[in-house]
Each structure stands twice: as C-alpha cells, then as structure tokens.
Amino acid sequence: MKRLYVLSLLFLLPFFSKAQCFTQIQFTNIDCFGNCNGTAQAFPVGAAPYTYLWTPGGMTTQTVTGLCAGGYTVTVIDNAGCTSTSSCNITQPSQLFCAATVTQQASCSTCCDGSGVGTASGGTPPYTYMWAPAGCTGSTCNTLCPGTYSFCVTDANGCTCCSTVTVTFSTGISNPGLVSGFDAFPNPVTKELTITANFSAGTNATILVVNMLGEVVYTKNETATGLVTEHLDVSDFPSGAYFVQVKTEMGSTFKKVVKQ
C-alpha cells in the first residue's frame, strides 16, 4: 500500500510541475507621442528551454522591441509542456503642442525690439525653450529683429515641437501719441548724447538705447509733463549704430544715432 502511494505521487508530479510555471513581463513605455519604441521582455519560471509567442505581431523572442502603443500578450511554453501567459499595456504620453505669437513688431528695419511669446502643452513637462536664431531660452523673447524665427519646445523625454513666426517692422513713428519734440543729438556723437522729448501731462514713457544686436544699453522710465532732457555719456560705447527709442502706451518713436 505504501509503494502504491509513492507511485501515485510520481504519477501526479508532472501535473504539479505544470502548475508551477508562470511568466512575468517587464516593459518600457513610449517616450514621445506617435513613436513605436516601446519594449517588453518575458521572464518565465518553469522548465527551460522556452518557446515564446507575442500577440499581436507574432514575435517569437523573449524580448520584443519597436512596439507601438497598445496591449500585448506573450504565451510561453516550457520544456515540460506547461503553458503560461502574461499581458502588458504599452502607453504613450499625450501629443506635445506648441505655438508662438508676435506680441510686438520691430520699430524699424534694423531694430531688434520686437517681442514674441510661446506656449506649450501636452508631452511630459517640464519644458525647455529655444528661439532661433535669436537665442532666447524662455517662453518669451524681447530682442527680435525683423525676420522669421523658430520657437521650439523640448519636453522632459526629449520630444520636440516647433512653431514659426515672422516679425515685421513699422516704417516710422507708430503713433506715440503723448510725445512730441523728440530728438537725439549730436549725430554722429562721440562723447555725450542729448535726448529730448516733450511729454503731455502724466505720460508714462520709457527711453531706451538699443545696439545693433538688440541689446538694451540704456533705459530710463519717465513720468513727466513738458520737456524732458537726458544727457547720456556714450564715450565708452563701442563705435557703431544705435537706436534711441521713446515708448508710451500709445506707441513708439525712434531715431538712429551713429557713435564714432
């Protein structure tokens, strides 16, 4: 009777072995919307060697790559005939969107005082920004010369999105409204530049001097009534062309000055 019991155990052992096989999956999701670079790898437990069948796709390797978003199942059969299955779902981030808008046109054909703002959504934050060829690295750029620019966004996974904008320029005074008598002299200038502007009552204005690279080398805010005179020492300024600009809430006006 004892011997029969042992034989019975030996007879049932293959069934116990089959019940012990199982499979787990390790996988990586897609980095950017629309890519097919997900991966999955099966890790079976049972009697090696194993055969694999992935669906959909029909791949027969332990590791599969180039997966698009969706669900995948692997069926594994071990050397003892034990079959196990496991499934995973490969996901992708939402699509990265970006857009750029010009918020201020340049004040002249060689002025670099145009402005733009860009927005981004989707993908995997945080984002980094680049305006080319201006070189600005924020969502806004305030040194745009007339021309076409690319606003590009890169998310945390390295996904990119680009949008283009075109900065134009005004042909002269763009209705500064509350300013008259604007002048900058002598021109050319070597040491001291005199800037004059006649403001209406309570005018909020900004006086700027911008070089040819779009860099603001002098700025002053004014709230004044009547004639304002500024004496600016430019003796240390590099030789070249500069633009003196007066801005109010109603517009701006400018003059080109040459530093000798």
Image: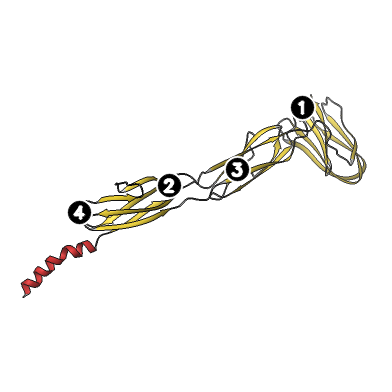
Of the image marks 4 and 1, the number of the one nearer the N terminus:
4
Q: Secondary structure at mark 3?
A: strand
Q: Which residue is mark 3?
A: 129
Q: Vertical placement of 227 versus 123: above or below?
A: above
Q: Nearer the viewer, residue 246 or 69?
A: 69
Q: Is residue 61 left or right of residue 144?
A: left
Q: Residue at x 57, y 42 (%)?
A: 161
Q: Is residue 33 left or right of residue 17?
A: right
* CA gap, disc 4 and disc 2: 31 Å
| Label 4–label 2 contact, CB within 8 A | no
Res. 241 mark: 1
Res. 68 mark: 2
Of the image marks 2 and 3, the number of the one nearer the N terminus:
2
Q: Secondary structure at mark 1?
A: strand
Return the residue found at the far right: 226
Q: Quadrant of residue 229?
A: top right
Q: Vertical placement of 171 versus 199: above or below?
A: above
Q: Nearer the viewer, residue 173 or 58?
A: 58
Badge nearest the viewer, 1 or 3 = 3
| Label 4–label 1 contact, CB within 8 A | no
Badge nearest the viewer, 4 or 1 = 4
Res. 79 mark: 4
Q: Is residue 149 left or right of residue 208?
A: left
Q: Nearer the viewer, residue 88 or 248?
A: 88
Q: Residues within 10 Å of mark 3 (few under 14, many from 20)?
A: many
